[in-house]
Amino acid sequence: MTKKKNKSQNVGEGSESTHPPSPASSASTTKSKDAKPPQPSTSALIICRNKHWRYISSFHGPWLQLPPEVLESLANNNYNLPRPRPIDPAVFFDLLKIRQLVDDATNLAVRAASGVTSSTLTNSLNAGNGLLGNGGMALGLGLGGGGGNAKLSRERKHRMREQATQKLSKAYHLDEIACSVATMQSASTLEDVAQLVLQRSPLDADAKYVHFFHEKIPSRQLAECTSLEPLDEVIAQRPNEAEILRTRAVTKIFKEDFISAAQDLTAALQICRYYQSQHKAGRQQLQLASDAAAEAQRNSRWKEETKLDEEDHPSSLETQLLFHRAGVYLTIACQSVNDAIPPKVSSNGVNGKQENGIPSETPPVETPELSPAEEEALRKRLEARKIVKTNAKRALRDYVSYLSHFDYTPGLPAEIAEDFVRKVNQAANGFKIPRPQNASRSLDLESNASLSNGKLSDALVPHKGAHRSRPQPNSPRTELPSLPPPVVYPISTLFSSTPPADLPPYPESVTSLSVKQQLQAPQNEAAKAILAQTDCHEALTYHPLLTDSLHSLLLCHCLIQTSARELQRHAHMVARLARVCDGYPIFQAARSPSRADWIEVVRRNENWIQLSQSWETLCAPAPLPGQAPGNQQKETAAEKKERLKQQAIMEALEDDRVHDEASFHAAVAARQRRQEEEARKAEGREMPKRWAQEDGKEYPISTDRAQAIVRWIREAPVGGEAGGAGRKKKRSSKTGTRRKAKSGVEGVVEPVDKLEVGDGENFERVEEEVD
């Protein structure tokens, strides 16, 4: 298979070399110039540029193999469900359209390459699962497939490739990450279709845009082997398309041009919101009306499925732009940390601070005058601290705006759930429950309508005591009692200064656990099953990038210097959401760089916010209904060792810095040493050295971002002051009470809703600060 792939790649490179130089082919010229030096290296792998795209693992899942008609049915069912919907409808509809567009484009490209004149072959190709099944892959590799009888003309092939390129361009416009994943599953013929169109139409904007993703470059060398000129030309031709600006911004992130990337993303957001307000106002009102109608029908278990027209599908572009821009701001903040912290001084604290970063209560007797060089260094540190705080607040604002697009419900209120379980327990044990006078506001256990569509009615018929007649299925009822609908919140409200008061406790206290055990003890199997159903009632709307956004929000709070107590509240809120965040059966579990960085920050700062349990334990998925933790088998020492070994291997394989066998073995060894250290700490044994001192130089697992945030927490003065030469800090009553953490680091809580950073901000000021 590798040989066949290389052969197809060589063919593509050969056709590329015959392409005459032109402004439209600047990316191809750059590729041929930059790709030649790495080729003699044994580690050089020539792959498409879109295989380097960030967060690709977040969009893996069964949606790539499901038949399009099944995926369409699931997308509409998901939209018709009451809030919070299991999966974000905008993302789900994008996946559906991307699958359809990539399938059609693959069909056209395969037919153009194989000379098939009719579309009758499409049915046989779609017979198998996946994108065009095995037959499409065979035709894409040029292995035959038997098609039409006549030969296609060159003009006909060109038109088919143009149509395929237009469909691919539309798919990349919708979501370039999801489309990159989908095209990887398709025939290899799709990779060269845009290049062949450019040979005859060098000014084709769609072909330029698609070829930018499909151009082959050396592996892990995207920044060195990528020119922005093709995207600049497409933007010049189509200045009102925010999607092209998004692609250029992500490319600039690879090139570490973060200020310019933020400018592109801000311009794209302005374009996106302008067109939404101008062209979709009426449709949004219709959508809100349909949502209200769906909420009114919440009490009915089933309702007629509504199939949305494509023009009425919600868009995910705004959430994409918010997520990317927040990541850019967070990166800019982390890059300025080292410049914002003064160099380390001697242990006697001549810089006016006690250990643990707390300012001294008694000012120094003498304040030496600063030299001009020291004044300049102090000024630069103050500017760097301003950059850290400002960009961290901007990142936090964008992450909160991103989270506002998704819903969360705590489920039924605790008193209603407990009353429900109590009455079910009474009914299951043969006690007759009197019908309440106000049936619309109370639970009615006399009917099947209030119990899981009647499936538990047999368990609730008492075998002793009063005889109870079962209602007939077709008998008319004047009123249908039901449970009240659960309240739904935007996820962003959970991280406000005043979160909702009706959230269930998390992590659960000892009191709540003991009460639950007391409820479970005297109950029969039917009541225990219903109690288990009420035990797992929290839910949220899933998005592939949600987990990374939640943990990035915690990293922003670290840079803003939120107090340890407030940060602990936010951390528990993130853990609460992470344990119920699941995109199955559409998405696989997503890897999160921010989650890994947050775990490293907590570990290296000795859990300064005093989390009661490890982060892995806090974020562990909630147990399934009826599943008790005590029923799980206890793994042996050998099984645990093997599990940890496999975990270290998988984490090393997922590390972007692993590029050869030596780095792979070093990564696995470093992770195994960390596991041993954590095991010894759990047993209460003292460690002679920290992990970072032991093997940090050999292969540092911690990323630069995590190291910068760790240093900021440990060494940064609170409030952004210089922290030297006897400078006093201003205390303000508006900022709240300063709280001292375990390690001595304290901070000031600043509510997110008071951040005065607008969307249309002037980036010239930021550029001056960075310069």
Image (cartoon, helix red, strand yellow):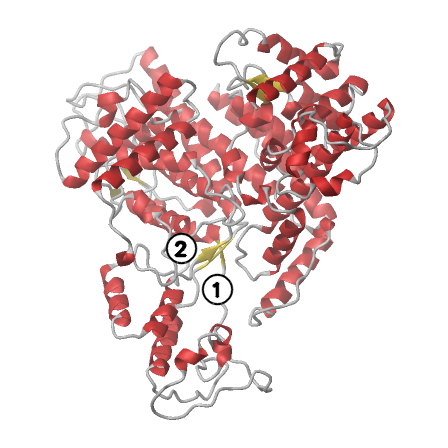
> Where is residue 289, by image quadrant?
bottom right
Decide if residue 607 is in sight here.
no
Residue 498 marker: 2
Mark pair 2, 1: CA separation: 17 Å
> Where is residue 537, by image quadrant?
bottom left
Q: Amino acid at mark 1?
A: Val
**Residue 259 in the image: above or below residue 615:** above
**Residue 241 in the image: above or below residue 142:** below
Q: Residue 461 in the image: state x and y as whole percent.
A: 40, 84
Q: Is residue 515 left or right of residue 347?
A: right
Residue 43 marker: none
Decide if residue 465 is in sight here.
yes
- Name the secondary structure under disc 2: loop
Q: Quadrant of the N terminus?
A: top right
Q: Earlier in the sequence, mark 2 or mark 1?
A: 1
How busy is the neighbourhood of tag 1: few (under 14 within 10 Å), some, or many (20 plus)?
A: some
Q: Amino acid at mark 2?
A: Thr
Choose between 165 and 295: the one closer to the eye: 165
> Where is residue 499, by image quadrant?
bottom left
Q: Residue 52 in the image: state x and y as whole percent.
A: 54, 25
Q: Is residue 620 left or right of residue 349?
A: right
Foreground tag (2 vs 1): 1
Q: Is residue 510 left or right of residue 86?
A: left
Q: Name the residue tied to disc 1.
A: 487
